Amino acid sequence: MADHLIVSPREIYNRRDEEVIGLEAWKRNVWILAGCTFLVMSAMSMIMPFLPLYLKELGMSDPKEISLWAGIIFGANFLTAFIFSPFWGRMADRHGRKLMILRSGFGMAIVISLTGLATGPISLLFLRLLNGVISGFIPTAIGLVSTNTPKKHTGYALGILQSGTVAGAIGGPLFGGLMSQAFGYRMVFFITGAFILIAAIGVTLFVKENFTPAKEEKTKTSTMMEFKKITSKKPVLSIYLVILLIQFAIMGVNPLLSLYVEELSPSCKCFSLRRDCGVSDWLCKLYDIGLAW
């Protein structure tokens, strides 16, 4: 009988954690944010396969010039995201992660929709830079789930959230290929903006955050000082460098994949299907893009 009355400190902490957060609230947050990250990741990856081809529609014809601009425009989004991410992280600590998700969601919905109105490579580059400035939907969603889920369920919650993100990354290029052939490149940007807008509205209406502002430190620190402090712990810097190299290798070829597929398309297997079986051009291009991604 006495054994049942003995409760470990960890159990007391977990029970208190669940009472503060709410047993049902965190589950609702996880599933809604998983659906929203699926929509956002699908939308973002929709435009990746044909972004270099969009430059051709904007009037560029020289293959070398297209390859150069494709790399610059593709990387511009990540450059500004890298610069502004620490700032938005601080704002999330002060004002809440839900607010930062909404800032990113509504902001990206507007900017990506405007990308469909680009008139040349310069305006496209500017909009990609601006999109990087206001990005951060998925990382902030991860932060919200981490801080609003009972400790013993955090791994499960983050796994569900990651599944939504990965599913979006898988399905996005396929949807983008279908829609670009059906509606044209420009229209896909408006559809992408609509997807992100739906995700932002979903977060607004259904996600609840239990937020306590972080206490401001008396001594102000710069981003560089905080980076040095974090990376002073031995595993962190190594992991950072490994992720940097992996992303550099993966993302380095992404801007050129669609151009490479276009170059190979006459000799692809789908060419024989088009010739012998009468398969339509858009199905063949979708097949080619699917192989590349």
Image: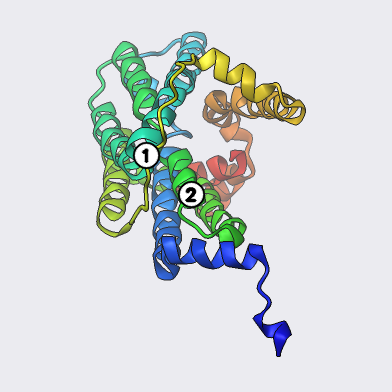
Residue drawn at (61%, 56%) of the image:
155
Looking at the picture, tell me which residue is in the foreground, 206 or 51: 206
Could you tell me the amino acid type at mark 1?
A: Pro
Looking at the picture, tell me which residue is in the foreground, 285 or 123: 123
Mark 2 burial class by Cα count in 10 Å: few <14, some 14-19, many 20+: some
Looking at the picture, tell me which residue is in the foreground, 196 or 8: 8
Does the CB distance between marks 1 and 2 fall below 8 Å?
no
* Residue 199 coordinates in the image, percent (x, y): 32, 50
The C terminus lies in quadrant: top right
* Residue 81 coordinates in the image, percent (x, y): 44, 24
Question: How far is the residue under mark 1 from the one under mark 2?
Answer: 12 Å
Residue drawn at (32%, 11%) of the image:
122
* Residue 97 coordinates in the image, percent (x, y): 38, 42
The N terminus lies in quadrant: bottom right
Looking at the picture, tell me which residue is in the foreground, 136 or 209: 209
- The correct choice, above or below, for 164 with respect to 185 in the image is below
- The correct choice, above or below, for 1 with respect to 214 in the image is below
Q: How many marks?
A: 2
Q: Earlier in the sequence, mark 1 or mark 2?
A: 2
Residue drawn at (70%, 29%) of the image:
236
Element under label 2? helix
Q: Quadrant of residue 240?
A: top right
Could you tell me the amino acid type at mark 2?
A: Thr
The reply, left or right, for residue 52 in relation to residue 273 is: left
- The correct choice, above or below, for 172 with respect to 73 in the image is below
The reply, left or right, for residue 36 in relation to residue 292 is: left
Q: Which residue is mark 2?
A: 147
The reply, left or right, for residue 183 in relation to residue 92 is: left
Q: Which residue is mark 1?
A: 213
Mark 1 burial class by Cα count in 10 Å: few <14, some 14-19, many 20+: few
Q: Name the residue furthest front.
A: 2
Element under label 1? loop
